[in-house]
Structures are given as C-alpha cells and as structure tokens.
Image (cartoon, coloured by chain):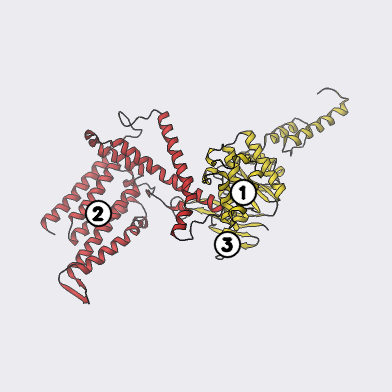
Chain colours: A red, B yellow
Amino acid sequence: MIRDITLGQYYPAKSILHRLDPRTKFLGTLAFLISVFIFHTFPGYAVATVFLVTMIGLSKVPVKFMFKGLKAIFMILMITVVFNIFLTPGEILWKWGILKVTKEGLILAGRMAIRLVYLVIGSSVMTLTTTPNQLTDGLERIMRPLNRIHVPVHEISMMMSIALRFIPILLEETDKIMKAQIARGADFENGNLIQKAKNMVPLLVPLFISAFRRANDLAMAMEARCYHGGDHRTQMKPLHYERRDYMAYGILAVYLGIAVVFRVVGL
Amino acid sequence: MSIELKNVTYTYSPGTAYETHALKDISLTIPDGQFIGIIGHTGSGKSTLIQHLNALVQPTSGQVLYNGEDVWDEKYDRRGLRSQVGLVFQYPEHQLFENDVLSDVCFGPMNQGKTREEAEKEARQALIQVGVKEKNFSKSPFELSGGQKKRVAIAGVLAMNPKILILDEPTAGLDPKGRDDILDQIAELHKMRGITIVLVSHSMEDIAKYVERLIVMNHGEAVFDDVPKKVFAHYKELEAMGLAAPQITYIMHALKEHGLNVDGDATTVEEAKESILKALAQKKTPEGGKEL
C-alpha cells in the first residue's frame, strides 16, 4: 500500500559517489545545474551529457532509478515543449491554421527539454547517493557562515533532519491506521469529494494525535539528554574532506571552466 | 465456514534493494469455532499473516479462500468479508477517533449500513461484553487507561458481529491483572458468541491456557501447527527461535529428569499440580509413607 512510497529515495550501494562528502556532492550538483544554464549550444550540451553519464556510471545506481524523478515533471516538460514549439516566432517550417512550427521554436524547445531533464537527473544523482541525514549535515556546514548574521542554521537543520526522519514513520503510521479503519468497514476510495473528505476524519484524528504524541516524546527525550541548541555542539561523525573530495572539486572546476570557455567562445 | 490459505507468499517491496520475504509458502485452514493462538517473535510474519485473513494485504503469490471463494477475485466483496472477519490491531490509538466511546464503537456497525439506533444497540452490547462500564460510554476514548482503550478497540470490531475475531497482541502493554482480565473476557466471548478466535501473541505463557491450537511462526514460515501440548514438547527448538515454552514445561521436564514420574506435557499450573501430587502419592505408597 502506502508503504511503497520512498522519500529521500536513497539507494544504498558502494561507490565513490556514495563515499564523497555531502558538501562536495551538494556543491557539485549546484555546479552542474549552473553549467546546464551556462551551456547554450548543442556541443555544450554534449559535454554536459558526457559529464552526467559518467556520474551515473560512477554512482552504481541502476539507471531506471535516475529516470524515476522524471515522471513527476512529465506534465511540465510537455507543456514547456509544446508552448515553445508553437509560440516562438521565426522561420516557419510548417503551418496549419493558426498553428505554426518555427525553426527557432524547435531549437528553444529542445534546449528547454534538455535543461529540465538534466536538472532533475542531476539532482537525482545527489539524492540517490546521499542519505537525507548526510544531506542536512552537509547543508548545515555549508550555511554555517550565516550564523554571523543571526540565522539559526543549526536549529533549521535540526528541524529538517527531524522532519525527514519522521516522514517514513508517519507514512507507516498512516498505513496502519488506514488498515485498522478499513478493518472496521471504513471506505477511503469511493464517494464524491465531500464524502471522501468526511471519510478522512477517522484517519486524520488518530494520525494527528500520534504525531503530537511523538513530537512530545521526542522533545522530552532530547531534553532528558540535555539538548540545548547549537552552541558548542560537536558531532559524532564530523564532516571532513578527504583526498577524493579535493579531486572532485578539481574536476568540477575544470568542468565549469570548460562551460565558461564554451560560452565565451560562443560554441 | 472457514478461511483457507493456499501456498501464500508475501514479499515487501519486491524488486528493490529493500526486498524482504514476510511470508513463505504458508498453507493452513481455520475452521469454524476454533480458538487459535499464533505465536512468534517480532518480525516473524505473524502480523502480516493475520492481515491476509481479512484481505487487508494481497498475497504476492498463493490464494486466500473464505468459504471456498477466492477473496482476491475481481468481483469478491472484500468489505463484506471484513465485517465477517474482524481484526483488532495492536494499538487502540490507531483506531479511536470519535468524541465519545459509544460513537467510536458505532463506527463499524454504521459502516455496515446500520442506523444509529441499531448501531448503538450493537455497540452497547459489545462494550458490556468486553467489560466497559456504562458510565464510561460518554467519555472521550482518549481519557481512558490503556486497558480500557484496548477494550473499546475490541468492542469496536466486535460490534460488527464478526464470525471470526482476530486479535493482534491484545495483551501488549498491560499489567498482569489487565492481561488476565482481557484474556478471560476473550475466552468468555468465544463461549458466549461461539465465534472463532485467533489470538496473536509473543508470550506462550499468556495463551497456553486458552487456545486449543497453536501456530508457531518463525522467519515467515509456520514451523509448528498443533495442539499446545505437542508444540511445547519441542521446547528446545522453540528456545532456538527466541521463544520459550511456559515455565511449567521446564519444571515438569526437570522433575522428570530427577526421577519423578510426572506428565511432561502439562501446560498449566493446575495440570502440573495434579500431576505432581499424583506422582508424589505414587512414590509414597510403596515406601510406606516415608517423608521425601
């Protein structure tokens, strides 16, 4: 049932990408996303493709998982492509009534599609190789300088980790509550919208009560262990860069360099 | 009237990195009127097994038959099945949601299409049968103690008049008195309503006294399926699975090893007492009433 939904979608495997520091992966993903916008010609996209395919190969994650994320943006992708093809003015290739396809439109649509698809696959590479907790740890470290301007970086990242941690628990809980109510004859599938909303009450009340109870318990457990926010707090597994991370940054710099050169040369 | 499982296998998240087999090739029949115990440690597949009995989960392969009909047939009325086969989950918090106890228990019967009056009648009867006092009917279910919540949850299913009542760990988290009370009441229901009862537990002690048939689950397989006495005779294997026979079984076996002619199959304290007294009497007579 609902249990099959995976969030955070981490795929456990032993690869160089899995071992990289989450900061490296986060900044690397950012660099890749920027590069997709710097490149604006098809030879450029070829370079990005080579880079992306190499990363997917290195990640040892089955390719079908990479494409799963595309399902979510399929509609947006279609709309973008269709609008760009038909609504861009320029050299007309084909005309039918008020519909006209232009050369510029085709090129623009192609570019948009490539960019969108690469954005999603690029970030999938990161989320598939990094556990949500590693990711929040990494973000906390990257954003630490913001502490100076009184942004509660630690608190934000703690909230993020807790929220992420609770998603699977609450999903499982929802599943159990649904089953318990279905066993009492509840019907979550049939009926019109108002009926459906009404039928959700037996699900939502126990779910909210349980969420509040869990939050209370967690707060209590944290206080019992003297948690008091981020000041002077050390980590059990502090993040530190290894040689492979410096190498990764080197490769990223070269890659971004190529992207900038392509742009300047106008390729 | 029976539930029959035929070669049922259930796999969680098939085809992913998290694939696990919860049930492996289970075949068993639950005939009418039996009082059955299902035992196994956490993760042995017992909860998954009982969710197959009222079609809450669909087996990955194999068949579930109710009165000979495949419940996963396209046209089969699974909602109807669920009011015949009542399942009470472990945590009452998962199902209590109404403002007062009585309305909560009415939820099931009203889903069956009964009017509020009819539902209330069923609800009152069910609540009294599980030992909830009339003065608690108008209380919020969230104000009640753990044991009382459990009773209300059981009443919530019982009010639907199921022919088979399945209870998942009804004694978890209760103190010894609450545990005995609930189990006695369940045994009482079995007698009074003549319904089939399936009791899931991880404690042998709890259910040995009540059940007439015991199914032992381990790693998704039904390892033993027999009368309790015969199952407990395998107490060494049970121990290897992380379960244990009732303490009485150990005492009786130890006494036997020390040469006292007692019945090693005794499962309850009462039986053991009789058997020990008998053995002692036997021992006394030939030796002319000497003190042991």
- Can you tell which quarter of the image residue A63 is in? bottom left
Q: Could you say whether the residue bearing mark 3 is in a helix, strand or loop?
A: loop
**Which chain is home to disc 3?**
B
**Which chain is home to disc 2?**
A
**Which chain is home to disc 1?**
B
Q: Is residue B91 above or below residue B6?
A: above
Judge from the rendering whether residue A111 lies leftward or rightward of residue B252; answer left or right.
Answer: left
x then y, percent, for residue A75: 32, 62
Which of labels 3 and 1 is toward the front? 1
Which residue is the extreme one toward the front? B117
- Give the position of the C terminus of chain A as an image quadrant: bottom left
Q: Which residue is mark 2?
A: A51
Q: Do the CB atoms of the residues marked 3 and 2 lie less than 8 Å apart?
A: no
Q: Are marks 3 and 1 on the same chain?
A: yes
Cα–Cα span, label 3 and label 1: 24 Å
- Can you tell which quarter of the image residue B44 is in? top right
Circle 1: residue type: Ala
x then y, percent, for residue A35: 20, 53
Q: Are marks 1 and 2 on the same chain?
A: no
